[in-house]
Image: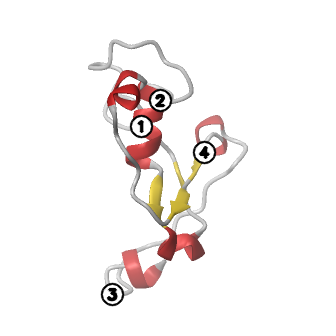
Amino acid sequence: MWAHYGGRHKGICLAFDATVSYVGGAFEVIYQQDRPVIDGHTLANSTQMAEKMMLVKSADRAYEHEYRILGRAGEFDPEPTQSIPKTKGDFF
Protein backbone atom coordinates (compact mmCIF):
# COMPACT_ATOMS: atom_id res chain seq x y z
CA MET A 1 0.00 0.00 0.00
CA TRP A 2 2.92 2.35 0.64
CA ALA A 3 3.88 2.23 -3.02
CA HIS A 4 0.44 3.51 -4.04
CA TYR A 5 -0.65 5.76 -1.19
CA GLY A 6 2.29 6.47 1.12
CA GLY A 7 3.51 9.73 -0.42
CA ARG A 8 7.04 8.44 -0.98
CA HIS A 9 7.11 6.89 2.49
CA LYS A 10 6.24 10.18 4.21
CA GLY A 11 2.74 9.09 5.24
CA ILE A 12 1.50 7.29 8.31
CA CYS A 13 -0.20 3.99 8.97
CA LEU A 14 -3.29 3.83 11.16
CA ALA A 15 -4.68 0.77 12.93
CA PHE A 16 -8.38 0.54 13.74
CA ASP A 17 -10.37 -1.56 16.20
CA ALA A 18 -12.64 -3.76 14.06
CA THR A 19 -15.03 -4.26 16.99
CA VAL A 20 -16.13 -0.59 16.71
CA SER A 21 -19.38 -0.52 14.73
CA TYR A 22 -18.26 1.84 11.94
CA VAL A 23 -14.96 0.08 11.39
CA GLY A 24 -16.43 -3.41 11.74
CA GLY A 25 -19.06 -2.41 9.18
CA ALA A 26 -16.47 -1.66 6.50
CA PHE A 27 -17.32 -2.89 3.02
CA GLU A 28 -15.03 -5.25 1.14
CA VAL A 29 -13.92 -3.84 -2.21
CA ILE A 30 -15.09 -5.80 -5.26
CA TYR A 31 -12.33 -6.48 -7.79
CA GLN A 32 -13.44 -7.20 -11.35
CA GLN A 33 -12.13 -7.01 -14.92
CA ASP A 34 -14.92 -4.88 -16.38
CA ARG A 35 -16.04 -1.48 -15.18
CA PRO A 36 -19.45 -1.47 -13.52
CA VAL A 37 -22.43 -0.46 -15.63
CA ILE A 38 -24.53 2.38 -14.26
CA ASP A 39 -28.01 2.09 -15.76
CA GLY A 40 -31.49 3.37 -14.89
CA HIS A 41 -32.09 0.55 -12.41
CA THR A 42 -28.83 1.32 -10.61
CA LEU A 43 -29.61 5.06 -10.48
CA ALA A 44 -32.93 4.30 -8.78
CA ASN A 45 -31.23 2.23 -6.05
CA SER A 46 -28.92 4.37 -3.89
CA THR A 47 -27.28 1.36 -2.22
CA GLN A 48 -26.41 -0.26 -5.57
CA MET A 49 -25.19 3.09 -6.86
CA ALA A 50 -22.86 3.53 -3.88
CA GLU A 51 -21.56 -0.01 -4.24
CA LYS A 52 -20.79 0.38 -7.93
CA MET A 53 -19.24 3.83 -7.60
CA MET A 54 -17.27 3.40 -4.38
CA LEU A 55 -16.58 -0.30 -3.96
CA VAL A 56 -15.48 -1.59 -7.37
CA LYS A 57 -11.84 -1.57 -8.49
CA SER A 58 -9.87 -3.18 -11.28
CA ALA A 59 -9.01 -6.86 -10.86
CA ASP A 60 -5.38 -5.78 -11.30
CA ARG A 61 -5.53 -4.38 -7.74
CA ALA A 62 -6.99 -7.49 -6.08
CA TYR A 63 -3.75 -8.04 -4.16
CA GLU A 64 -4.69 -5.01 -2.01
CA HIS A 65 -7.53 -6.84 -0.20
CA GLU A 66 -9.05 -3.43 0.53
CA TYR A 67 -12.00 -2.52 2.74
CA ARG A 68 -13.68 0.89 2.74
CA ILE A 69 -15.75 2.73 5.30
CA LEU A 70 -18.56 4.73 3.71
CA GLY A 71 -20.66 7.42 5.32
CA ARG A 72 -23.55 9.51 4.08
CA ALA A 73 -23.70 13.26 4.75
CA GLY A 74 -26.37 13.41 7.45
CA GLU A 75 -26.99 17.13 6.99
CA PHE A 76 -27.59 16.90 3.24
CA ASP A 77 -28.90 13.39 2.66
CA PRO A 78 -32.69 13.19 3.23
CA GLU A 79 -32.93 9.44 2.48
CA PRO A 80 -33.35 7.14 5.47
CA THR A 81 -30.16 5.41 6.55
CA GLN A 82 -29.91 1.78 5.50
CA SER A 83 -26.61 -0.06 5.43
CA ILE A 84 -24.44 3.07 5.13
CA PRO A 85 -24.36 5.17 8.33
CA LYS A 86 -24.89 8.92 8.27
CA THR A 87 -22.13 11.21 9.48
CA LYS A 88 -22.52 13.70 12.30
CA GLY A 89 -20.67 16.99 12.29
CA ASP A 90 -17.49 17.43 10.31
CA PHE A 91 -15.99 13.98 10.72
CA PHE A 92 -16.70 10.29 10.41
Q: Residues within 10 Å of mark 4 (few under 14, many from 20)?
A: some
Closer to us: 91 or 3: 3
Identified by mark 1, the residue type is Ala
Closer to us: 73 or 56: 56
The residue under the point 39% across, 86% down is 9
* Mark in the foreground, 4 or 1: 1
Q: Position of residue 37 (x, y in %)?
A: 38, 46
Helix, strand or loop at label 1? It is helix
For the residues marked 2 and 1, what is the alpha-carbon distance in whole angstroms? 5 Å
Q: Quadrant of the C terminus?
A: top left
Q: Earlier in the sequence, mark 4 or mark 1?
A: 4
Closer to us: 23 or 83: 83
Q: Earlier in the sequence, mark 2 or mark 4?
A: 4
* Mark in the foreground, 3 or 2: 2
For the residues marked 2 and 4, what is the alpha-carbon distance in whole angstroms? 18 Å
The residue under the point 45% across, 61% down is 57
Q: Quadrant of residue 80?
A: top left
Q: Which residue is denoted by mark 1 in the rendering?
A: 50
Q: Earlier in the sequence, mark 3 or mark 1?
A: 3
Closer to us: 75 or 78: 78
* 17 in relation to 84, above or below: below
The residue under the point 44% across, 73% down is 12
Does the CB distance between marks 2 and 1 fall below 8 Å? yes
- On the question of residue 39 being in view, the answer is yes
* 35 in relation to 37, above or below: below
Q: Which residue is denoted by mark 2 in the rendering?
A: 47
Q: Which residue is denoted by mark 3 in the rendering?
A: 8
Q: Residue furthest left?
A: 76
* 86 in relation to 37, above or below: above
- On the question of residue 87 being in view, the answer is no
Q: Which residue is denoted by mark 4 in the rendering?
A: 23
